[in-house]
Amino acid sequence: MKHIVWGFLAVFSLMGQASEMESLSTAQLQERVKAINTLQNAILMKDSKVSDVDALFANFTDDFQYVHEGYGGNYSRQHLYDNYVKFLKAGEYQYTTARYKIISMIAGYNAVSVERQQEYEGKLENHLSVFEFNGSKVSKIIEYWK
């Protein structure tokens, strides 16, 4: 009897893990990227708060990684969070309009490549980013621009 109970527990445990790992549809992935983009823009606004940072990071996995070779390499979830809060409290975020506008997206299996545009020093710049997902949460963002 004890073996049967353990068997059921093991099956239900694996089923729970499998549902967490299910991949999202193309439309769902693209909606998640739009939501993350909106949250990222909100942090950069003039009157943003630490709660805006918290709202963004609630969408990241515990082992989230941010990779941006142009800005120094790999950042852990905690390091990136701490930087956002530090710059926020120092008054560095003073945007009055959204920084990033999504131009195009290509969704693949648990990932989306995103072309985003920003105006920098009066010029439009397009940036390439890849958002990787574990279920509905972002597990990694890789930036391919300087």
Image: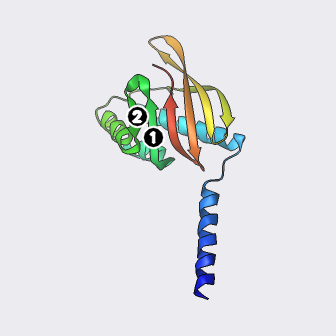
Q: Residue 21 location, x and y as percent?
A: 61, 54
Classify 10 Å Cα crowding around label 1: few (below 14), some (14-19), many (20 and above): many
Q: Amino acid at mark 1?
A: Gln
Q: Amino acid at mark 2?
A: Asn
Front-most of residues 13 and 42? 13
Q: Residue 127 location, x and y as percent?
A: 54, 21
Q: Residue 74: give its label.
A: 2
Extreme-bottom residue of the structure: 1
Which of the 4 image quarters holds residue 50? top left
The reply to whether the C-beta atoms of the residues labelled 1 and 2 are less than 8 Å apart is yes
Residue 112 is left or right of residue 62, and the answer is: right
Element assignment for label 1: strand
* Badge count: 2
Mark yes or no: residue 49 visible: no
Give the labeled residue for mark 1: 65
Task: Name the residue: 56% across, 24% down.
Answer: 128
Task: Name the residue: 43% across, 26% down.
Answer: 69
